[in-house]
Image (cartoon, rainbow, N blue to C red):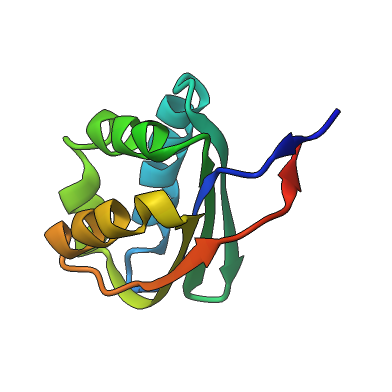
Amino acid sequence: MKRLDGCISVYPAFQIKPGREQDIRALLRVIIERAESEPGTEIFSMAYMGDKLFLRESYTDIEGFKAHLQSVDDIIGDFFSMLTLESLYVIAPASAIDEMKALMNSMNMQAGLYALEGGFAR
């Protein structure tokens, strides 16, 4: 049976800074390796279109997202130094919207925040 969707989803799109393509790919391999062992991380994938990067992230709940941030805390500065944020959308249960907004603001990221109102997840 499918469960009610209460996941936190984060969809950032970035411009990769010139000359940093290989560096960002290498760092993302580290991030994905860490994310694979995070119990609250359900999806962490990347897609490229030339020098643009799109991430698709999904976490079981707000605690899963915060655990991921803690997992990459030592390398997140390097990650962001190679990129320019173009857009960021967050989908979360209404109960987590304020906390997600605060977390995004703490990273100097402006997000479009969508309150989840229904659906399912596997």
Q: Is residue 116 above or below residue 122?
A: below
Q: Hey, which quadrant is residue 104 in on the image?
A: bottom left
Q: Residue at x 41, y 32 (%)?
A: 64
Quarter residue 1 falls in: top right
* Whether residue 10 can be seen here: no
Q: Is residue 12 above or below residue 4?
A: below
- Judged from this view, the residue extending furthest toward the bottom is 86
The outermost residue toward the right is 1
**Rendered position, 18 above or below 37:** below
> In the depicted view, which residue is nearer to us: 10 or 120?
120
Q: Is residue 114 visible?
A: yes
Q: Quadrant of residue 2?
A: top right
Q: Nearer the viewer, residue 40 or 79?
A: 40
* Residue beneath the point at 58% across and 66% down: 48
**Please, is residue 18 above or below residue 65 in the view?**
below
Number of disc labels: 0
Residue shown at 44%/57% (left/top)? 94
In the picture, measured across the screen, residue 116 lies left or right of residue 102, that is: right
Instruction: Indicate the position of residue 3 as horizontal and vertical percent values.
Output: 73, 34
Locate residue 53, reporting x and y percent.
Answer: 49, 67
Q: Nearer the viewer, residue 51 or 89?
A: 89
Q: Is residue 74 left or right of residue 11?
A: left
Q: Quadrant of the C terminus?
A: top right
> In x, y percent, where is residue 72?
27, 36
Residue 110 coordinates in the image, percent (x, y): 27, 74
Instruction: Tell me the residue at 17%/59% (across/down).
Output: 107
